[in-house]
Amino acid sequence: MIVRIMGEGQVKLADSHFAELNKLDDELLEEMENGDGPGFRVTLHALLDKVRELGEPLADDELQPSELILPPPDASLEEVRELLSDDGLIPG
């Protein structure tokens, strides 16, 4: 799956990593629902760091359609809330 982190670029992630990412996504969703700004910030950074760690970066000239778009690390709680689906940022 191709994942874009807004403002950074794209990475290719194996589907096998999504169970681990979904745990962080669930935490993020709960913190948003509870209005936990500090917890939200920590978990958003943890999620993006994990995507960077597990993903294989695509070259800047290798633009492919992104199947998943994640917010930038400096996104506000309100900005991320606009990107959410019922499943959070990561479907499943």
Image: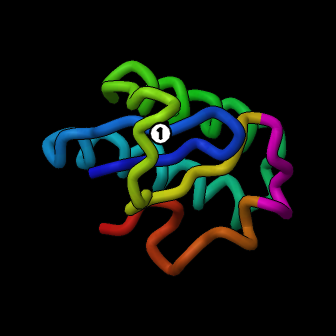
**Residue displayed at 63% across by 30% down:** 45
How many marks the image carries: the answer is 1
Q: Is residue 75 magenta?
A: yes
Q: Is residue 5 left or right of residue 90?
A: right
Give the residue furthest to the top. Answer: 53
Q: Amino acid at mark 1?
A: Gln
Task: Determine the secondary structure under disc 1.
Answer: strand
- Magenta stretch? 74-79
Q: Which image quarter: residue 32?
A: bottom right
Between 26 and 51, which is closer to the camera in this rendering? Answer: 51
Neighbour class for label 1 at 10 Å: few (<14), some, many (≥20)?
many
Q: Which residue is mark 1?
A: 10
Between 72 and 89, which is closer to the camera in this rendering? Answer: 72
The image shows residue 74 at horizontal and vertical percentages of 82, 37
Between 4 and 49, which is closer to the camera in this rendering? Answer: 4
Give the residue furthest to the left. Answer: 16
